[in-house]
Image (cartoon, rainbow, N blue to C red):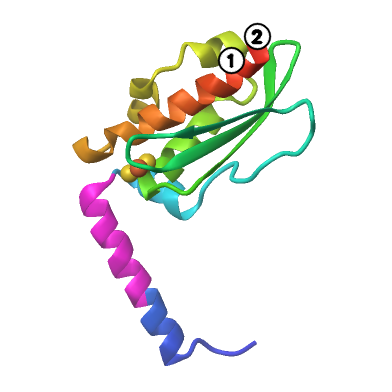
Amino acid sequence: MSEKSDFDDWVDQIQKEIIEEDLKVYSKKVVELFYNPQNWGSMDDWKVNKSSYKGPCGDTIQFFIKIEDNIIKDAKFLTDGCGATVAAGSMTTIMIKGKSVNYALNLNPTDIEDALGGLPEEHKHCAILAINSLKEALRNYTK
Ligand code: FES
């Protein structure tokens, strides 16, 4: 096993500085989920309910939701949006997995934002984007 080089130390230091800058703007939970997204990815199964929702900012978030007997068995997401959207998509999937379709239908952007420890004013729409896309996927199931 090789020892850490000066280059590795330099990379660690840069990463630390970037995260410290992010923490000046975002909550700890947002930064954690941005750097370590949960339930990132897609599902191909024909039974999966899919959505793709583009917000006014031009970013898109997609949800892939597997439902059995009205219970959300699995949920994944993808986005080309900002870090706050990655965090909002992660939190949304975390909150709905194992819950009923009705529970998910009643979630609103404030629930996601609260669970994330808040979002800066200019990124509140990222939670709206996540919820709109979630509801589109659920609509595909309920209709
Ligand atoms: S989704 Fe567009 S800025 Fe976050």
- Helix, strand or loop for disc 2: loop
State yes or no: residue 20 in magenta: yes
In the depicted structure, whether residue 69 falls above or below residue 136: above
Dominant SS in magenta? helix
Disc 2 packing (10 Å; few <14; some 14–19; many ≥20): few
Going 40% across and 31% down the picture, which residue do you hit?
129
Q: Which quadrant of the figure shows ligand 1?
A: top left
Q: Nearer the viewer, residue 128 or 30?
A: 128
> Residue 139: which disc?
1
- Contact between marks 2 and 1 (CB within 8 A): the answer is yes
Amino acid type of the residue that numbered disc 1 sits on in the rendered structure: Arg
Residue 61 visible in the shown view: yes
Q: Quadrant of the C terminus?
A: top right
State yes or no: residue 102 in magenta: no
Residue 101 in percent (x, y) is at 61, 13
Going 47% across and 11% down the picture, which residue do you hit?
106
Q: Quadrant of the N terminus?
A: bottom right
Which residue is the site of mark 2?
Answer: 143
- Helix, strand or loop for disc 1: helix
Disc 1 packing (10 Å; few <14; some 14–19; many ≥20): some
Q: Which residues are magenta?
A: 13-26
